Image (tube, rainbow, N blue to C red):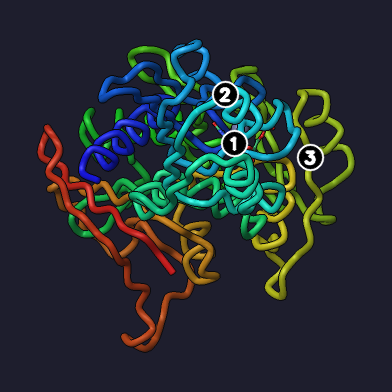
Amino acid sequence: MESDERYMRMALELAKNAEGRTSPNPMVGAVIVKDGRVIGCGWHKRAGTPHAEVNALAAAGDLAEGATVYVSLEPCSHFGRTPPCCDALIKAGVKRVVVAMTDTNPKVSGRGIKKIRDAGIEVTTGLLADEARKLNEVFFKWIEKEQPFVTIKSAMTLDGKIATRTGQSKWITSERSRQYGHRLRDINDAIMVGINTVIADDPSLTARLENGGRNPIRIVLDSCARIPLDSVLINDGKAPVIMAVTEKAPEERLRALADRNVQILVCEEDTNGHICLQKLFRQLAQKNICSILVEGGAALMGSIISANLADKAYFFIAPKLIGGETAKMAVGGEGIGELSDAVELFDTSAEVLDGGDVLIKGYMR
Ligand code: AOF
Ligand code: ZN
């Protein structure tokens, strides 16, 4: 039905109100309709708080009896931080439930839909399923693969440089691009950089948006714990810091970091003696870090790309040229020899931002 699609779109839009705030839960929206009128809406605001359906039912009150509920994800069937939504819908006496897609969380996985059907309620599934899946690309990667969703972000010139030959990098891109970058920090659970970036830039890695913003957990890859002890990010207390080190890191450095409330993760090395990123990502996923924004520098970007660990990419390109053989490029590492091995992005889009920078984004793998 045409109106089914309209209400489901509304549910998807409502879900987005909580973008970046629901982790490790998905974003979910719900719309309750009776006699062609919306009688209640809701969305899931934050993990540990009521789910979308429960918020919408509360808004509709007794009117929910005999109504149709549109929900962007299968209603849950498990007792988690909150009780099952399928029970709440059954209790409210709704007549029909329209679901965009099944929840692939193994604790739910069709059981919510079955329970609602078994209670004699009509259930329609699969409406705008592609949109619903894309909305929660982060959650589905995390719950299905037990890996975080990894986004790489780089700000470069037309000739792919991220700094001049003397190392100047502030600022390559426009104010608008940088605000966009802060929004990406705001909606990701964690931000990751390599130690060379910390030494070169002494960044704070916080989300500085006009209306506040939420700081991500800051993760630094630093095998030997070389981080200067006066670095801003381990002293400003603005967000947790995780230092990923290996056994090469000296004890007394680790103690000094622990004194600054830094969490230390001792990681395994790969065959090149670098931190094994696959294993580190798995460990981070187990800590409920569902999304990571990788901001460089060049070496880390090269490792992530060659290990095929990125899901999504944002390249901000300023219409400027820097030139120079030694000026750093966005992606370091060894690079490929055969053109046929080039990493190709898919589902790409390009957008000219105010200020003239071009944002190219797309998916990887
Ligand atoms: C829904 N509606 O709005 C959301 C759902 O720990 P809990 O109780 O918050 O449960 C979290 C799980 O519930 C989460 O992993 C996902 O499978 C589902 N999320 N389900 O019915 C919602 N956010
Ligand atoms: Zn639920």
Amino acid type indicated by mark 3: Ile
Residue 175 versus residue 280 in the image, above or below:
above
Q: Write the residue at 68% across / 40% down.
A: 77
Residue pointed to by mark 2: 46
Horizontal and vertical percent position of residue 165: 32, 52
Horizontal and vertical percent position of residue 358: 17, 47
Mark 2 or mark 3: which comes first in sequence? 2
Quarter placement of the C terminus: bottom left
Which of the numbered marks, if any, corresponds to residue 107? none
Q: Can residue 221 be seen at all in this image of the molecule?
A: no
| For discs 3 and 1, the disc positioned in front in the rendered view | 1
Residue density around tag 3, few if under 14, some if 14–19, many if 20 or more, within 10 Å = some
C-alpha span from label 1 to label 2: 8 Å
Where disc 3 sits, the SS reads strand
- Classify residue 38 by image quadrant: top left
Answer whether labels 1 and 2 touch (C-beta < 8 Å).
yes
Q: Quadrant of ligand 2?
A: top right
- Classify residue 258 by image quadrant: top right
Asked if residue 57 lies left or right of residue 260, the reply is left
Residue 270 versus residue 200 in the image, above or below:
below
C-alpha span from label 2 to label 3: 27 Å
Residue density around tag 1, few if under 14, some if 14–19, many if 20 or more, within 10 Å = many
Amino acid type indicated by mark 1: Asn
Horizontal and vertical percent position of residue 8: 33, 38
Ligand 1 within 8 Å, label 1 CB? yes
Horizontal and vertical percent position of residue 246: 79, 55
Residue pointed to by mark 1: 25
Q: Nearer the viewer, residue 52 or 175?
A: 52
Q: Can residue 10 be seen at all in this image of the molecule?
A: yes
Residue pointed to by mark 3: 264
Q: Nearer the viewer, residue 218 or 9?
A: 9
Where disc 1 sits, the SS reads loop
